[in-house]
Image (cartoon, rainbow, N blue to C red):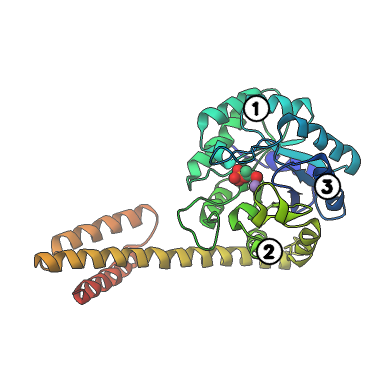
Amino acid sequence: MEITKENRKWLDAMGLSHPIVIAGPCSAETEEQVLKTAHLLKDTDTNVFRAGIWKPRTRPGGFEGVGEIGLPWLQKVKEETGMLVTTEVGNAQHVELALKYDIDILWIGARTTVNPFAVQEIADALKGVNKPVLVKNPVNPDLPLWLGGVERFQAAGISQLGVIHRGFSTYNSLHYRNKPKWHLAIELKKEFPDLPLILDPSHICGRRDTLLDVSQTALDLNYDGLMVETHIDPDKAWSDAAQQITPAQLHQMTLDLKIRQKSSSGEEFQRKLNMHRKELDLIDSSLIDILADRMQIAESIGRLKHKENVAILQSGRWADILATMIQAGADKGLSKEFVEEIFKAIHVESINIQHNVK
Ligand code: PEP
Ligand code: MN
């Protein structure tokens, strides 16, 4: 897929500053709630007003959105505040209605990106229409599926594209509602540096107190913007109450965020350096997690061998692993010495762990 500089231009053409701020309630609830929120957001850094009209709910019976009656409310937001408006579309009928009410930007929800049939249906409905489309990551951590969503819109002739990183669903995550798994977005950015990348900290955090921290990480990684759920009375929101903040809190958050600007070449160097260091830190902590997982498996093997009274060192298997890894490393440009040293250390530690199990 060719994502070129053209992909970024629509952000500039729309006069959207860096970073772009998309804010508004999880769901449009009433005309009054939508308009009050929008008027308060008008005095913040918000460029685009968001509100869910159709809400994909995991289980039936919850609030599934106000539907079509909410679309004229968004039109009023445009007229009264001058902000652009965006909503989620999940099928061709939503697209038709969103176009009828002249919604400026459409976004594809995480539960839709997982379904290529639905994405294709929406892309077909948008053929010949010149609206920006933002594709949220799928709920599961699958980069090709995310890119596949973008590619379906590109193939339908939509050139104003962007992606929204809203985290990935995991069972029993303590800290996050949806784990960020930053390396997936970093990989996407590496492959397509000109595709605008926006962070949705609200669905990643699922709570208010960590929004700033997660948003700062995104700005340090040079994301192009943020989408933050904002409500006049967050505790009373009809959906996602725990993660929404007031327009005043959003304003404070944008003041607290350190926005990395490009200016002198010295600063540009520092910015790039900081970004790469942040990437390295994230990869290093993933390395520790992976090594810990590997050692846990070694421990299970140790227990199994102990029970069956089998010798710990299986030299044939070890020689195979080492040869395979040296080859795999060479294929990716890593030297034989380096791979050998790392795997020898891993092997020694595995053996020690297996020795210690009783
Ligand atoms: C939303 O933005 O309110 C939403 C439903 O998000 P997601 O698709 O990321 O769950
Ligand atoms: Mn929401």
SS class, disc 2: helix
Q: Please report whichever mark, 1 or 2, sits nearer to the chain's N-terminal start.
A: 1
Cβ of mark 3 under 8 A from ligand 1: no
Q: Which mark is residue 157?
A: 1
Q: Nearer the viewer, residue 99 or 331?
A: 99
Image: 260 above or below 38: below
Q: Which mark is residue 38?
A: 3
Residue lying farthest front? Answer: 61
Q: Are marks 3 and 1 in contact (CB under 8 Å)?
A: no
Residue lying farthest right? Answer: 80
Give how far across and how far down residue 180 sits, in percent: 55, 56
* Quarter containing the C terminus: bottom left
Q: Name the residue located 77 percent from the left edge and 31 percent from the top edge.
A: 69
Residue lying farthest left? Answer: 309
Q: Which mark is residue 212?
A: 2
User: Spatial distance from mark 3 to mark 1, Cα to Cα?
Assistant: 32 Å
User: Spatial distance from mark 1 to mark 2, Cα to Cα?
Assistant: 36 Å
Q: Please report whichever mark, 2 or 3, sits nearer to the chain's N-terminal start.
A: 3
Q: Name the residue located 66 percent from the left edge and 35 percent from the top edge.
A: 54
Give how far across and how far down residue 296 sits, in percent: 30, 66
Q: Are marks 2 and 3 in contact (CB under 8 Å)?
A: no
Instruction: Specify few, some or many for label 2: CA neighbours under 10 Å numbering under 14, 14-19, or 20 or more.
Output: some
Q: Name the residue located 60 percent from the left edge and 58 percent from the top edge.
A: 205
Give how far across and how far down residue 220 sits, in percent: 65, 63
Pair 1/2: label in front: 2
Res. 327 image quadrant = bottom left
Asked whether, in this view, residue 311 is left or right of residue 348, the answer is left
Instruction: Say what amino acid the circle numbered 2 marks.
Output: Leu
Give the quarter the ligand 1 occupies.
Answer: top right
Q: Which mark is residue 282?
A: none
